[in-house]
Amino acid sequence: MGKDELKKEREAVIDSVFIFMNDEIERDGALIAHIEFSFDAESEDTVAIIKETAISYEPICEALNVCIARNYVTHRGLGTGKYGGLILTEEGQGRAVSVEAAKHTIPVAGVEGSRVQIGQIHNYGNAQIGDRW
């Protein structure tokens, strides 16, 4: 598997972790700072995410390392272990919401993702593009 494919796979696991965490938060109707997750080897959250996503523990740990490094999740306090006492940050929740919204968007013919290609502009004199002076 190439480097780009590994990155895509890792980002997909990260998205799955975010969606899992955000769904739990929304199910409880709580604020992100009030729900704490533990992804230690045999914890309840670990068992639940593996059952829900069918992703093994090692890729989840790798994804959590990236999430911690990017400040998508953070530790609520000290002494909870590497993957214990984690809370989703606003950035992490924003990504989870964006990923969920992207799943439900209807593809438009000629538009790839969020990229819109308008076409070429040919100008042989003075021109103003947009409404700025």
Image (cartoon, rainbow, N blue to C red):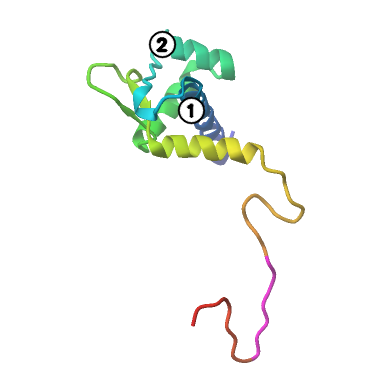
Q: Quadrant of the N terminus?
A: top right
Secondary structure of residue under mark 1:
helix
Total numbered badges shown on the rendered structure: 2
| Tag 1: amino acid | Asn
Range shown magenta: 118-124
Location of residue 120 by image quarter: bottom right
Look at the image and say whether residue 60 sits in the magenta stretch: no
Residue at the top extreme, as displayed = 42
Per the image, the residue denoted by label 1 is 22
In primary-sequence order, the first of circles 2 and 1 is: 1
In the foreground, 33 or 3: 33
Look at the image and say whether residue 123 sits in the magenta stretch: yes
Q: Residue at x 39, y 19 (%)?
A: 37
Q: Is residue 47 above or below residue 4?
A: above
Q: Residue at x 71, y 44 (%)?
A: 106
Magenta stretch: dominant SS?
Answer: loop
Q: Residues within 10 Å of mark 1 (few under 14, many from 20)?
A: many
Residue at the right extreme, as displayed = 109
Cα separation, mark 2 vs mark 1, equals 21 Å
Report x, y in % for residue 60: 47, 22
Q: Is residue 96 left or right of residue 88?
A: right
Location of residue 44 by image quarter: top left
Report x, y in % for residue 50: 53, 15
Q: Residue at x 54, y 27 (%)?
A: 16
Per the image, the residue denoted by label 2 is 41
Q: Is residue 31 above or below residue 28?
A: below
Q: Is residue 66 above or below residue 79?
A: below
Report x, y in % for residue 117: 67, 63
Would residue 2 be visible to someone looking at this image? no
Q: Which mark is residue 83?
A: none
| Tag 2: amino acid | Ala
Secondary structure of residue under mark 2:
loop
